[in-house]
Image (cartoon, helix red, strand yellow):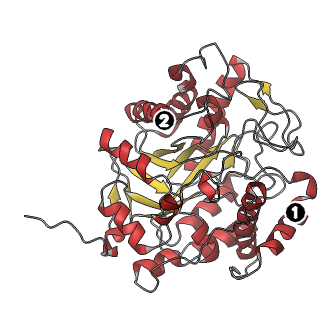
Amino acid sequence: MTTAPRATDRSLLDRPLTLPNGFVVPNRLAKAALSEGLAERDGAPGERLQRLYRRWAPSGVGLTITGNVMIDRRHGLGEPGNVIVEDERHLEQLRAWAATARAGGSRAWVQINHPGRQTPRTLVPRPVAPSAVALPGSAKLFATPRELTGAEIDGLIARYAAAARTVVRAGFDGVQIHGAHGYLVSQFLSPLSNLRTDEWGGTPEKRRRFALEVLRAMRAEVGADVPIGIKLNSADFQKGGFGEDESLEVVHALAEAGVDLLEVSGGTYTSSAMLGVDPSLKESTRRREAYFLAYAERVRAELPTLPLMLTGGFRTATGMVDAVASGAVDIVGLGRPLTVQPDFPADLLAGRVDESVVRPHRMGLPLVDNLTELTFYSVQMWRMAKGKEPAPERHAALNVGQYLIANGIGSLRSPRAKS
């Protein structure tokens, strides 16, 4: 008779995970995607990004997921400094990035994304989206999008697939579709942003068609041995929007279509639950660390063999071990902890630390809270990109000022959903 592992046994986090296609993740800790904002002006992953990932290489994670890489420089830039992969023009820089990300033994995946309407008008004056629905509460910082034509939708699906092919050729081990946080895939899924009545909208089945077609097109390009994951909202936390029940239907369809790993998240620009400062999150949820654990448990109950990664709120060894030991999740995603403690996973696995120093920065004003939370961790990444160490004790207001100066006051926008 086997004995269930004790929740204090952090060796659980150091065990490999084999995905259904045979791909092995060395341990149960992952660097979740974080939008770095460090690409060169032409969208290439240059030396600044190399320095950041060189610092993260010995972090101890088994899986490294890059910040969101864009597929359309004309209509699809989410923020200044996005890496752009439309073709193979930056193949050598991509190869260097992949080698750096994998140097410490981690597997490396690229998160592939299109922002749809969630692009500041200073970058894209006329964005595209499933429907011509403006981003609510954006203080005119985002332009009202133009509705995509059927041919354009087919073209975007091809772009997702081409980007996947290119980054795998460059040496990355896999890819992740960004289907959360109100970006384009998420916009197709939501009945609030997708008002179409053609084959791409009007029913839950048609709204999820875009995500499924992106997955199928990528698979056709990279083959069965290359893992394809997706980051998906448990809900968008908006009245009348994409909810948990419909999200579960999407997960069933994705699993049937052969997705290799589901990362659970939640929220949008207007309800940033993933940042941990949104008032919709109950205090009891924050205390148990994993913001979306209850939803992950629902997915596990219905799809017990689908590998699950959960990101958002994990701060202590106990919380991470509990989540994996319970069987609810397979991989713990860490984002903000790695921006202020780049060696945190290795230190945690070795027993040198028990918890992260990350704490939400809240003043009680949602717009200010979300902006402060975003900029605090973005600036930490920029420090490492300059060869400096993070400065977690630095006052958050200084980071806000540095962020606005670096991006220009005109690019300030409603709180950015993390990758």
- 90, above or below 52, in the image: above
Name the residue tied to disc 2: 247
User: Helix or strand or loop: what does disc 2 sit on?
Assistant: helix
Q: Residue furthest left?
A: 1
Quarter residue 132 falls in? top right
Task: Give the x, y percent position of residue 337.
Answer: 58, 71
Residue where numbered disc 1 is placed = 404
Which quarter of the picture shows residue 26?
bottom left
261 displayed left or right of 325:
right
Tell me if residue 345 comes above or below residue 196 in the rendering. below
Q: In what element is the residue under mark 1?
A: helix
Count of labels in the image: 2
Residue at 73 percent across and 79 percent down: it is 387
Quadrant where the N terminus lies?
A: bottom left
Q: Residue at x 43, y 46 (%)?
A: 295
Can the viewer see residue 303?
Answer: no
Residue 63: percent from left, percent from top: 48, 61
Instruction: Please determine whether, in this image, residue 170 is positioned above or below residue 230.
Output: below
Residue 79 visible in the picture: yes
Q: Give the residue at the far bottom of this rendering.
A: 352
* Callout 2 amino acid: Ser
| Residue type, numbered disc 1 | Leu
How far is the residue under mark 2 from the one under mark 1?
35 Å
- The answer to whether residue 419 is above or below residue 180 is below
Residue density around tag 1, few if under 14, some if 14–19, many if 20 or more, within 10 Å: some
| Outermost residue toward the top in this view | 198
Looking at this view, is 323 or 405 the one in front?
Answer: 323
Left-right relation of 90 to 321: right
Instruction: Tell me which label, 2 or 1, sits earlier in the chain.
Output: 2
At x 81% / y 43%, what residue is drawn?
138
